Image (spheres, helix red, strand yellow):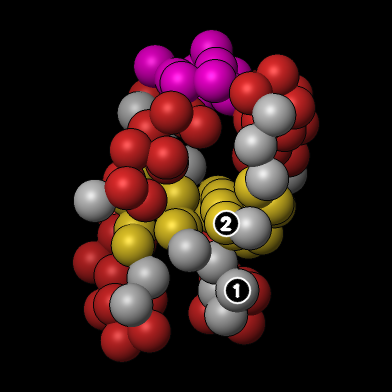
Amino acid sequence: MKNILLCCASGMSTSLLVQKMKQAVAKRGIDIAIRAVPIAAFAENMADADIILLGPQVRYQQAHVQAIAQRQGKRVAVIEMRDYGLMDGDAVLTMALTLLER
């Protein structure tokens, strides 16, 4: 099972996106766990994550998150503003899966 961790300012705005992504996972019939946390808590929550996705509002934290995550072999990416704004769970899931395949 793959694990995707979403991070935003407080963990609240990504909660809806997590639900949309879980719907996309169910439609595809794949085995992926997805959860959201505040950016301040990402380090304590990244142990089982295969990829960490940042909400556009915390993209300024990308270098900091990458520096910590890469020590554990974790990938970090920023969710596209359009996909985030539209809460397009399928598009964000596709992006995450593409990055996981690399």
Residue type, label 1: Asp
Find disc 2 in the rendering and name its residue.
2
Residue lying at 57% horizontally and 80% vertically, measured from the top left: 47
90 drawn magenta: yes
Residue lying at 42% horizontally and 41% vertically, measured from the top left: 96
39 drawn magenta: no
Residue lying at 42% horizontally and 40% vertically, measured from the top left: 97
- Where residue 41 sits in the image (x, y, percent)? 62, 73
Find disc 1 in the rendering and name its residue.
48
- Where residue 28 sits in the image (x, y, percent)? 64, 23
Look at the picture and state if 31 lies above or below 52. Answer: above
Residue lying at 33% horizontally and 38% vertically, measured from the top left: 98
- Where residue 48 sits in the image (x, y, percent)? 60, 74
* Residue range corresponding to the magenta coloring: 82-91
Work out whether residue 16 or residue 92 is closer to the camera in this orientation and state it.
92
Check disc 2 and report its element: helix, strand or loop.
strand
Secondary structure mostly taken by the magenta-highlighted segment of the chain: helix
Residue type, label 2: Lys
Give the quadrant of residue 15: top right
> Can I make out residue 43 in this image?
yes
Name the quadrant of the N terminus: bottom right
Total count of labels = 2
| 2 or 1: tag closer to the N-terminus | 2
64 displayed left or right of 9 = left
78 displayed left or right of 8 = left
Work out whether residue 61 or residue 75 is closer to the camera in this orientation and state it.
75
Q: Quick one: which residue is furthest to the top in this view?
A: 86
